[in-house]
Structures are given as C-alpha cells and as structure tokens.
Image (cartoon, rainbow, N blue to C red):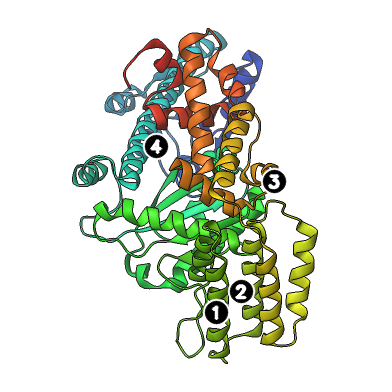
C-alpha cells in the first residue's frame, strides 16, 4: 500500500480522482487537501516528529496561497523520492515548462480520462514499488555491513580480554570500526554472570534494553550462556562507585524482571591502557567466582572489600578467611583449620563495632564451606546448623558451634577430589546434549557448587561452563566434517536449541560460520 496526497482547490476534481482510484482498485491510501499550504503542512507531519512519508503527490498546477509548482519544489525538498503528478488545463503549459527541473513524473490534462489516468498511475505505482525495493536492498546491505563491523569489534574485544594479539593494533582497529572510546580515555569493564542460562536467549534484545538504562557508551561482548562483558566509557562518572553500583543494580533488575535470571555483577577499576584488560578480566572472574558464597546476588568491585565499617576501617575480609580455610581443608590440615578459626574469633572479639548480623553471616558461610568438604553433603543438616548460628546469643556460642562442625569434617583427600573431577568430566562427555548446570553436576558428585567449580578449574585449567561450551562446539565441528546433518540439527544434537546463538558462538570460537566451516571457506 502506498500513500497518495491529492492537492486541488476544486472538490469535484478531488472526488473524481478518488473515484477513479477506487474504481481501478489501486493499492493507494488517499489523503486530500484544498491548497498548497495545506499540502505542505500535511507533508511536514502536522506536528509529528520528522516529515510524513508520502509516495505520490497529485497536485493541480493553479491553486490559491501556493501554486502546484512551488508545492512540488518544496515537497521535493522534504520527500526526495516522492512521485509528482501535475494536473493542468489548456493554456497552462507555460507553467509546465517551469516544472522540468522538478523531476515531475507525469502530466495529466483536465478533464481527466479514466484510461489515461490508469496508464499514468500504473507507471507511477511501478516507480514507487521500485523505490521501495531499492530502499529495502540498501537497508539489508547496511544491516550486513553493521553486523560485520559489530562482529569484528566483539572479536577484537575478546582478544583483548583473553590477552591475544597486539593490544595496540586491536585498539587502533577498534577506533577505525567506530568504537566510541577516544584515545587516552579510560575504560571500565563490567562482568555479568547469571546463575541460570540467559544470554543465549537474550541476544540483540538485551543490547537494546541496556542502551536504555546505561548512561555511557559501551560495547557488549557475549562469552557464553552465563557470562557477558560490558566495556564502558564512563567519562567523568568512572571514579564514582555509587554511579556504577546504581547502573549495576539497574542491570540486575533488567535481567531478573525480563529474563528471570539472578546475576552477580563485577566492575573493574578504570583502565588507562587496553593491554591491562586481560589481567583485570582474570581478577574479575576470580571475584565473581567468590560470590557463590553470598546468599544474594550483588554488585561488586575488584580489589574492594564487600563491607565497610562506618568509621572507614575495612571490615573482615570474608574472601580471605574462606580462601585460607579452603586451602587448609584441601590439604587435610586439621591443626591449621583450628588455628584459623581461633584467629578469626580473636579478631572478632577485637572488633566490637562489627554488626552481629554480619558476624553471623560470616559464620554461616564458613559452615557452608566446611560442609562442602564432606563426602556426603546433607542440606537439611546444614539448614539446622545455620538456624543455630542465628539463634546464638553471644560470640562464645558461635565459636563453640564452628569448632564442633570443624571437628566433624572429614576432608576429602587429593585422590578423592581427582575422582570427583573425573566423574564430572564423564558426566559432561555423556550428557553434553542436555541442559547441564554447575549445581546439577555438583549434586551428582556430592560437592557444593563453589567448591566443585574451584577444584575443577584447578585440575583442568578452565571453568566448567567454558569446558562444556568448548566440548559441545568440538562435537559440532566433528559432525560438520564427518556427517551430512544440517547445521540446525547439529546445533540441537550438541545441546543448543537456539540456532542463531549456536552460529554466533561457533563463529566466535572458529572464526567462521558452521556452513563456511563445512565448505572449507576462510573466515
């Protein structure tokens, strides 16, 4: 359907044209005005933002206030692609000569004849159709061009995050590809990690939603179904943790409300050199892994304690306590476990300004870690111990409770840990087609998710999520090379219901699409 505007000061002429359009069944939506001034107001949108789209303008050559030629000239300025048809009577061809530079499509002589009108409008509608097709083709080319630029920007940023290639060359190419960071302007990274699958389904819609709630320029880089990174250019706000934290909470609400995903978000400090991105990204991954110990998802900053006292002194470093206890239990150093707990309570007694709620929270997390090192993890028993912690009336009761739990722990030896990791690998290799998650795997080997995550990475050098992704894509690569299965069926076979996401992930790993990979074409 195309829109036609009829401008003529004679009502009978306008009604005649409308009648011909209806009689011929032309695919036109008709609007009409009495003079050139009204026509110009209609083209300008009558207060709408931007000009109104009109495909065809049929105008009388002689009208009050503004004649048809002036209207045609001003319409051409506002709608360069509009098809203009001039209506004229005998003796008005001097006017028509002035119309030559205006690229008038056709002239119709009054009174109108149906056959001539039908022939002219057929040509005009064909020209409109060709114009629409050219616009659509140009839009598709722009989309492909923009998608190529976006893919290349994401690939360069992935290289920077993983420390691949020259950071200087990558930065220079990013600038050429339209990255909004000017030379010397500091960056800030935000790592988004969800507890459940999210980013495979979110896709481009998430980027659009983030644009509405993040006040700074940014690039979005998806790592896998559970992790994405934002590379921000926060400008003057980069030093203000409160602004970053507020942005992080808006992102959490977006992910929770729209996708039902709970997320931890970790911000890096300001980075002045792109070469520092890889090292800082490793810190962020370590920080977000530590947040498994937190009961609720949060917004964190690398190198900053999670809690601070009102007088400005740093609060107890939960991650330090957890890390040392974990190391001691991994080595079955019972004496060191007891000594660490003694030191912890000595520090607590020396910190009378600490919140009793926070102290009980620390004790709950330590009990969680102690239980995670049992060969049999009983959630009901753990819940009972946490209830006892929050019912404790003083620090002495808390100390006695933690010492009792520590005495009951039978820490797994190295061979048992290795066997647990081997069992997880066997489960991944067997069930990679299914929706595998860290919590489900941990439950099958009787370990806490956080403890399994750290032990798996220690044994294999990579995280469970990354290992599953790499294994699935390697299976997809084998199927592409050794079978005639369709790419969409291969995606389903290796555990990806979302084919477009599978293609995007495959391209980020192998530098080309599944189809081109099978054909042996270069990226």
**Label of residue 404 in the image:** none
Give SS at disc 2.
helix
Residue on which disc 1 sits: 344
- At label 4, counting other C-alpha atoms closer than 10 Å, the crowd grade (few under 14, some 14-19, many 20 or more) is many
Depth check, mark 3 against mark 1: the one in front is: 1
- At label 3, counting other C-alpha atoms closer than 10 Å, the crowd grade (few under 14, some 14-19, many 20 or more) is some
Instruction: Indicate which disc, 3 or 1, sits on the residue closer to the N terminus.
Output: 1
Q: Work out how far the residue at label 2 is from the one at label 3, CA to CA, in angstroms.
A: 24 Å
Q: Is residue 251 above or below residue 507?
A: below
Residue on which disc 3 sits: 443
Residue on which disc 4 sits: 75
The residue closer to the viewer here, 230 or 364, is 364
Pointer 4 and pointer 2: residues touching (CB < 8 Å)?
no
* Residue 100 picture location, percent across and down: 28, 24
Q: Work out how far the residue at label 3 is from the one at label 4, CA to CA, in angstroms.
A: 70 Å
Residue 47 appears in the rendering: no
Pointer 1 and pointer 4: residues touching (CB < 8 Å)?
no
Give SS at disc 3.
helix
Depth check, mark 1 against mark 2: the one in front is: 1
The residue closer to the viewer here, 343 or 286, is 343
The residue that appears at 32% across and 50% down in the rendered structure is 278
Instruction: Indicate which disc, 1 or 4, sits on the residue closer to the N terminus.
Output: 4
Does 309 sit left or right of 238 as displayed?
right
């Amino acid at each position: 359907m195309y829109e036609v505007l009829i401008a003529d000061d004679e009502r009978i002429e306008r009604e005649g044209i409308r009648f011909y359009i209806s009689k011929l069944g032309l695919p036109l939506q008709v609007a009409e005005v009495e003079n050139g001034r009204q026509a110009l107001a209609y083209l300008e949108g009558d207060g709408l933002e931007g000009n109104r789209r009109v495909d065809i303008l049929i105008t009388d050559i002689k009208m009050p206030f503004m004649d048809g030629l002036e209207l045609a000239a001003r319409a051409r300025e506002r709608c360069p692609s509009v098809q203009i048809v001039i209506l004229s009577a005998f003796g008005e061809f001097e006017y028509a000569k002035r119309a030559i530079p205006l690229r008038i499509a056709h002239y119709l002589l009054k009174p109108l004849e149906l056959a001539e009108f039908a022939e002219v409008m057929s040509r005009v509608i064909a020209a409109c159709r060709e114009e629409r097709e050219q616009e659509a083709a140009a839009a598709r080319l722009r989309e492909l061009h923009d998608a190529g630029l976006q893919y290349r920007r994401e690939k360069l940023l992935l290289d920077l995050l993983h420390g691949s290639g020259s950071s200087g060359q990558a930065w220079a190419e990013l600038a050429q590809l339209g990255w909004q960071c000017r030379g010397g302007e500091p960056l800030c990274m935000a790592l988004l990690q969800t507890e459940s699958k999210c980013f495979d389904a979110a896709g481009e819609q998430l980027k659009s939603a983030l644009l509405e709630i993040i006040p700074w320029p940014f690039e979005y880089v998806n790592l896998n179904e559970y992790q994405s990174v934002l590379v921000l250019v926060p400008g003057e706000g980069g030093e203000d943790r409160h602004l970053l934290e507020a942005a992080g909470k808006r992102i959490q609400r977006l992910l929770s409300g729209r996708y039902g995903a709970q997320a931890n978000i970790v911000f890096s400090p300001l980075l002045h050199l792109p070469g520092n991105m890889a090292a800082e990204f490793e810190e962020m991954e370590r920080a977000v892994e530590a947040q498994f110990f937190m009961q609720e998802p949060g917004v964190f900053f690398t190198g900053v304690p999670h809690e601070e006292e009102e007088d400005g002194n740093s609060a107890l470093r939960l991650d330090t306590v957890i890390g040392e206890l974990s190391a001691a239990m991994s080595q079955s150093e019972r004496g060191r476990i007891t000594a660490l707990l003694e030191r912890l309570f000595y520090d607590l007694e020396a910190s009378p300004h600490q919140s009793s709620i926070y102290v009980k929270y620390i004790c709950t997390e330590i009990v969680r870690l102690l239980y995670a090192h049992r060969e049999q993890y009983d959630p009901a028993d753990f819940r009972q111990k946490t209830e006892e912690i929050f019912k404790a009336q003083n620090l002495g009761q808390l100390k006695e409770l933690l010492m009792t739990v520590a005495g009951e722990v039978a820490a797994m030896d190295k061979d048992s840990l290795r066997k647990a990791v081997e069992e997880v690998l066997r489960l991944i290799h067997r069930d990679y087609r299914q929706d595998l998650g860290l919590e489900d795997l941990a439950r099958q080997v009787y370990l806490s998710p956080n403890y399994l995550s750290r032990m798996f990475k220690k044994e294999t050098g990579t995280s469970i999520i990354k290992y599953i992704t790499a294994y699935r894509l390697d299976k997809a690569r084998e199927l592409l090379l050794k079978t005639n299965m369709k790419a969409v069926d291969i995606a389903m076979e290796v555990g990806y219901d979302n084919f477009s996401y599978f293609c995007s992930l495959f391209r980020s790993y192998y530098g080309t699409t599944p189809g081109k990979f099978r054909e042996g074409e270069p990226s």
